[in-house]
Image (cartoon, helix red, strand yellow):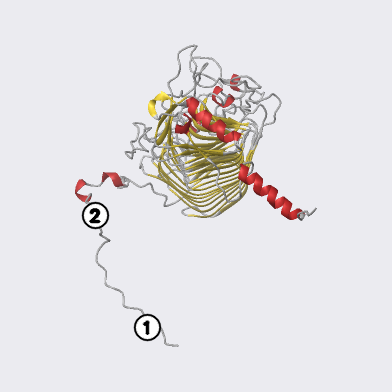
Amino acid sequence: MRTLPLYRTCCVFALALTASGLIRAADQPPAVYNIRDFGAVGDGTTLDTDAVNKAIDAAAAAGGGTVLFPAGTYLCYSIRLKSNIELNLSHGATILSAKQPAAGQPGYDEPEPNRFGDLAYQDYGHSHFHNSLIWGENLENVSIVGTGRIWGHELLRNGGGPGQGNKSIALKLCRNVNLKDFTILQGGWFALLVTGVDNLTIDNLKVDTNRDGFDIDCCRNVRVSDCLINSPQDDGIVLKSSYGLGFARSTDNVAISNCQVSGYTMGSLLDGTYKVPPSGGGTGRIKFGTESNGGFRNISISNCVFVHCNGLALESVDGAIIEDVSISNITMEYISNPPIFIRLGARMRGPKGVAIGAIRRVNISNVVVAYAASRAASIISGIPGHPVEDVTLSNIRILYKGGDAVTPARRGGERAGGGNRRADGWGTGLPPAPPDAFGVTENEDGYPEPTMFGTLPAYGLYVRHANRVTIDETDLSTISDKEARPPIILFDVHGAIFRNIRAQAAAGVPAFKLNNVSDFSTEKFIGVSDQQRNSVDEASIAGTDLPLPGSTYTAAAPAENVSESANVAIPRGASGPAQPRPPAPPAAPQP
């Protein structure tokens, strides 16, 4: 009997499997599952949840594929993702959150149990994932792509009960996740909550929401790029390391680039009106924390824009170690609190006995800020016995509004009218530390916000409980000619280098105030003689020719305030003034 060679037998077998659909040829695209083929209507009033989930189930049963949302508005409760699935939102497609159900009626999926229960070490929103418009858990190879929209119109901003949903997208313990090109409007508590997700790419999303934009929690190998996030009532892009998984896990190897965060009135980013709230701006910032149990390592933030929102915040208050951070090429305008806030504290909301964390090896460079609130200067602050370490600020230009009067702050452990907030965490386990030498509260166990210290006695930079701080090529100035505070104060700082600095100060106001400072030096600080001091118990360092701007300063007018007469349409085909035609290139030489 004649037999085929082994390699021919294998080829014939593989071809048979491919023809039968049991395996897919390498060049064959994944199957597409149109949700309308599974009964979706897309009229915005008919509930399409079952049709969408049936399409996902069919794709998953076949080993994976693309679930297509053609143009239309698809009213849904919880959409359950599965591995090897791509949701593709076509042009004109909207996933619309359904109304919160009446008591006892079916609605969004029930919140799953959390190992530590609710509110033990993190809030309700971080404790549950299934009560979302779109969710997935323990998945791999998942994508949501396309130019359509997710509209969480009916999602809750906080809390929730049986059948109620509060997040647009929630992913837990997944890997190889791709989110690209779509829009989220009014995303609920979180437009995107990803916890324990590795190998995550978020690219070209536009988010205009009523609370947090992206919460990236306990994740590793993350790329966030080319996104617009408008979140006036909470943070824009926030890295966290909570106990939402039931255990501490660090957030590592993250790159955030080419993004904009803002605090315009919700909806006015996507409709192009860019309405500024009466307060002048919302939250909308890039932040590390507040949940900070596991740590943050190897983080890069570059080429980002902040507008009408809060500034950059790096916070470790629950035992996290923040280390190896590079932040560069940042611009900010109309910032409603300090442009730079680095805080090591001791709220310690987590298991008892965890050590206080650390912040070290942080470089921030090439930052330009205009019209920043100056009630609190840019802040680098540890707590007694736990300094922030190895921070470098270079090529920094900050224009503050200026003119704020110094006011004290209540301790974070006290509420107006009595009561106590220390139950939020274990704190230091010690009596509250007294105010520092400049009268500023330590507030070591308080919720970390720049306003926690009141209006500070410096307008530009306030550094305390820190080791090895370098400030280079930095300009600190104010708009107001009423500013009576010095630009820089240092307390309990050991190793401080100031090079190539320009700052403003009123007549008779020093450039520096120092207390309990060692290994301090200045070089080429305009108006201040070069200094080298091994130890300073208490001193002021005066400067000359550090004038405030006076009343002649005029803030730049926003482009949208140009006169109507300047708004002249450019004729079709116009390409600017006629230019002389360039001479013809010389003829090529003949061979």
User: Residue 150: x, y in percent?
Assistant: 44, 33
Of 364 and 474, the residue lying toward us? 364
Q: What residue appears at the point 41 percent right and 52 percent down from the top-left corner? A: 545
Query: Residue 290: in sight, yes or no?
Result: no
Which residue is labeled 1 in the image? 587
Image quadrant in which you'd find residue 113: top right
Query: Residue 434: in sight, yes or no?
Result: yes
In terms of secondary structure, where does tag 1 sit?
loop
User: Residue 279: x, y in percent?
Assistant: 36, 31
| Mark 1 neighbour density, 10 Å: few (under 14) some (14–19) many (20 or more) | few
Q: Which residue is at the far left?
A: 565
Q: Name the amino acid type tagged 1.
A: Ala
Specify which label sits upstream in the sequence, 1 or 2: 2
User: Residue 31: x, y in percent?
Assistant: 54, 41
> In the figure, 277 relative to 494: above or below?
above
> In the figure, 101 relative to 535: above or below?
above
Image quadrant occupied by the C terminus: bottom left
Badge number at residue 570: 2
